[in-house]
Amino acid sequence: MALYILYESASGYSLFLAHGLDEIGQNTEAVRGSVADLNRFGKVVKLAAFSPFESALDALNQCNAVSEGQMTDELRNFLELTLPKVKEGKKPKFSLGVAEPKLGSHIFEVTKIPCQSNEFVLELLRGLRLHFDRFIENLKPGDLEKAQLGLGHSYSRAKVKFNVNRVDNMVIQAIFLLDTLDKDINTFSMRVREWYSWHFPELAKIVNDNYLYAKVAKYIEDKSQLSEDHLPGLTDIVGDEDKAKEIIEAAKASMGQDLSPIDLINVKQFALRVMDLAEYRKKLYDYLVAKMNDIAPNLAALIGEVVGARLISHAGSLTNLAKCASSTLQILGAEKALFRALKTHGNTPKYGLIFHSSFIGRASTRNKGRMARYLANKCSIASRIDCFLEKSTTTFGEKLREQVEERLDFYDKGVAPRKNLDVMKSAIETVESKDTEMDVDEPANEPSAKKSKKKKSKAGAKEDAEPMAEEKPEAVTNGNTPEEHKSEKKKKKEKRKLAQEAEEEKNELTENVNGANGFNAEDGTAKKKKKKSKDENTVDLPAASEGKKKKK
């Protein structure tokens, strides 16, 4: 059986035929020994076909497809043109050796070409990689190295830019910076307290908040100059007039030592830096909340922005978090305790990072483990929805949060919660209803051609209706006033009545004559009645036609 080998280089696809296999006996060790020697290896492998890439972009696309185990249209055409055709119902007399087993399985599924990937094929590919420039004619020295370098740079650049996890790297960096800022602000605030307490030790007991303490220290500076004139400013900072008065009274009887102006300037500048850091921390928190609402809205709605961001950063990405099982997510962040428990055969931890959620704190001591397990289950669902759902919505997160609240009530009060299936159905219905509302609003705002056509048709109908309405008054009001028209109607009715009476008299005369001649009176009357009805219809028609003629 002939063996063809597919080699993907930086310059194009190449197909080699390994024809001298009997001499080696398909032994991997023999091939490994013959790879280094070009004379021996050249007798085993010969070039069958070569298809160069059209451009650097084409080379990058082909390289991405091969790395993902996908066969492109160019590769399929190349293989179908160069390889022998396989007849239907017969086994092929050749096989194709490839480096990637996934690519080989995809080629076999699409083209039914048998593929193999083993140590023997990999050794042959190693030899081809070593001596590839010798097999291709008219190849200048250094061209292949340039193509490999350019393709390597573009492939790496594309992999760095291409991020399936949207922009969750920003969330990871923001939560790391937020934790670092919390530690630094706490350390610096303690340093401000310790430094300024040498001058005004009583202030530390009056003002407990670190940010507020730095603000007050910056405002006061020298305690000896603090007087009643500073009361409004202190009240604005502290927010309490009694506390501001207490600070002023404490400054008058303070036991602290005096500081030189240079020392006070340094304390003031340091307090200002701490205040700036605290304000920047607030802005960073707002940025993190906005990013989490964009990247993982359902997870943020369920467990909060900070805890959700910590889970994403600990897992590495949103996709990695979505791949985690709920049992893994439950103890995420407690790896040391877990392995220590496994080593000492103790109790494993019940929760990790999700302990910072308010739900775990609200649960009783007996139900904390149950609540952590249930919450981890819902967080796993929310992370998968956020990762793989194309549209951004918080509906699922809000419904999952309602379920967690119901589970808390179930543990505390015994109220039975809703089923997960019913909750998810209602969430899907609300999402679909929102989508339909959006679809309805868009055409309402945008003027369409159909609406203009409808308007034109309505306008035409109105125009048609207007002449009809004008004709009716003409038929009704040929005179100048409605009273004249009523008199004309009465005259017509009287004429019709006179004509009918004259016809009845004629019919009675004919009946009398027929009775004298011996005709059956009953039959005659019946026939005459029918004739009367016909005559009346015929009389009405000409009368109506006469009226129309008069109107015209």
Image (spheres, rainbow, N blue to C red):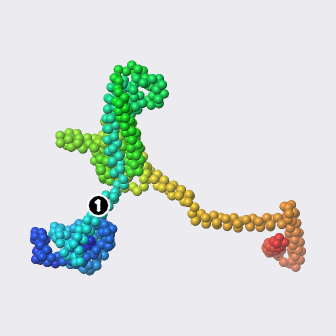
Q: Is residue 78 above or below residue 229?
A: below
Image: 399 above or below 516? above
Provide the secondary structure element on which disc 1 rests. helix
- The residue that appears at 67% across and 67% down in the rendered structure is 460
Which residue is disc 1 drawn over? 156
Quarter of the picture containing the N terminus is bottom left
Q: Quadrant of residue 477?
A: bottom right
Of residue 41 and residue 533, the one placed in the foreground of this image is 41
Identify the residue shown where x is 88% and y is 79%. 517
Of the pair 270 and 180, the residue shown nearer to us: 270
Is residue 482 visible from the viewing direction of this image?
A: yes
**Whole-percent x, y for residue 548 in the image:** 81, 72
Quadrant of the frame with the C terminus: bottom right
Q: Give the residue drawn at x 38%, y 51%.
A: 295
Q: Amino acid at mark 1?
A: Ser
Q: Residue 34: x, y in percent?
A: 11, 72
Q: Nearer the viewer, residue 409 or 219?
A: 219
Looking at the image, residue 545 sits to the left or right of residue 179; the answer is right
Total numbered circles? 1
- Does 62 appear above or below 1? above
Give how far across and how far down residue 454 sits, in percent. 61, 65
The residue depicted at 19 percent of the width and 69 percent of the height is: 129
Q: Quadrant of residue 278?
A: top left
